[in-house]
Image (cartoon, rainbow, N blue to C red):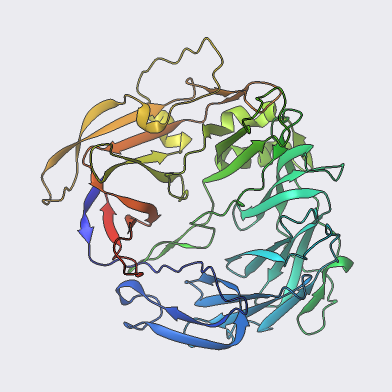
Amino acid sequence: MLARALSHINLWNYSQVAFEDSDGVDSLMVIGLNGHGHGHSDALYLNFGTTFYDFTVDVIQKLVVLIEARWETPTLARFHFRSIIDGEPHPLARHSTVSIQLDNPTLRPGPISSLELRTEVSGRLFIAGCGWRYTGCHLYEVLLFDWVSGALLGRIDSKVTITAGFVLLDGEHLAVYSATTQSQSAHPDLVTLAVYQVPSLAFPTRNANGHFQTRVYGSLVPTLVLEFPPIQKGLNFQLTCPIRPTLGVGRLVFDGPTKFACSRLPMLDVQISLYEEDEHELGVGTPYCVIYQIYISTHHLFNLLAQQGHKATLSWNEWGPRATRWFVDEHNKSPLVGSRCIQWVNSEKDNRQRLSSIEFNPLSVEAYLTPSPSARDEISDYRPSIHEYRPLESNVQQVGASGPGKENRASVVTIGSDDKTIFQAGFEQPIESYLPYRITTQQDLIHTHWRWILEGRRLIGYPVRTGPDWRSPPLSVYAIH
């Protein structure tokens, strides 16, 4: 439920900047919302004295990692570990800069693509995923470092990866989601989610003052490999955004007198995007494309890890239906935070929106199931938007815009495991999924925003820009009860 808009929030936020300057930048402005975090009530300007193209922040450890990768050296990258207090090298880092030298990729003729990097920090663990998208290169690496000691803990190497993304499940397990091929073609032979044990011991030291030649290190072997359904022949796997939770392991959940950090991800969300390049059978003159958004419960994944032991591979039917829920992709949704995300639909009458909260938590959702019809006698390639459901309504006490004590109505619907989602488009066989979830829809409409995100117990809206002013309007912030 939403309370009235607030004028500030206690959590920090930072932006992933799309740098228009190809030469990179050397400075950041750090703003502690409500004055918490870095000890300054005003914005803090940090000049690092080194050029970088991206960055990642760990507020708890007062750490910012500057990411440096240049077009002219597509196999070399540097990571600078700096303090967000003063911009100096972080006092805990043995090496203020760690650099990696990767194998030379075999690229298609034409312009060489720069190295693409995705990073994550959790405690002492620093993870970097490396690849070259849109180049025909199937080389992909994930490197795991102890950034405090400067040691390389592990390496995951693949030469058959079309696209991949990684996510830390907890302090001991890393999941890599990838589409791979054995034929070096654009068509994937297999889509998998592989779970690796994070090593506790470092590789023998072979680095020169923080520089690592990665090819001399062996590749880790997954503990558990979970296969997705076989893709229909003639379809290609579209390169999509890697999985990247807004609330990662080790990140702040709540900030205040008592701080809470995320210790285990309850849910993952991934995309499967399929398309055909050649016009045949599926439609002449009309490009065929289908995008699925898939929500995965890690509760089931950790149960499988405990049951299967080491080095197990499970087919889709052995793990997928009960651990996932599939939807046709909807663009108007926030990133998944914990087990919850926000979706919205625009009003056809005026410039307003209706928000819904979707929670994927099988343990709590199953305990409060409401009876509803579940029979499905035919296979369907389409499941309605969450906003097309007719939910069971209940009176909910909440804090409204006019203050506490006002009674508002919220629509609540629970989709249990007996109500299956069934798709077939793009796959060789029908795909079932039945992870339970619950939808709570606010009845009051809210002024239109182009984006909503969850931050702790607050919902932040990004207003639509209007007028000639290039600046963004002030954020809208709501408390969630």
Horizontal side of residue 434 vs 183, given as left or right? left
For the residue pair 452 and 478, the one nearer the viewer reads as 452
**Is any atom of residue 174 visible in this view?**
no
Q: Residue at x 35, y 23 (%)?
A: 370
Picture layout, residue 128 above or below residue 174 = below
Point out residue 367 in the picture as x, y percentages from the top left corner. 40, 30
Quarter of the figure with residue 203? bottom right
In this rendering, the answer to whether 305 lies above or below 132 is above
Residue at the image position 81 percent from the left and 51 percent from the top: 221
**Picture layout, residue 454 above or below residue 105:** above
Tell me residue 184's x, y (percent): 85, 46
Residue nearer the viewer, 383 or 5:
383
**Quadrant of the drawing holding the N terminus:** top left
**Which residue extends farthest front?**
285
Q: What is the count of numbered marks?
A: 0
Question: From the viewer's perspective, is 126 left or right of 347?
Answer: right
* Residue 242 at least partly seen: yes
**How far across and how far down the image is residue 239, in percent?**
66, 48
Left or right, 478 with respect to 71, comes to left
- Residue 152 occupies quadrant: bottom right
Residue 465 spot, x, y in % from top left: 33, 60
Q: Is residue 47 above or below residue 193?
A: below
Q: Quadrant of residue 37?
A: bottom left
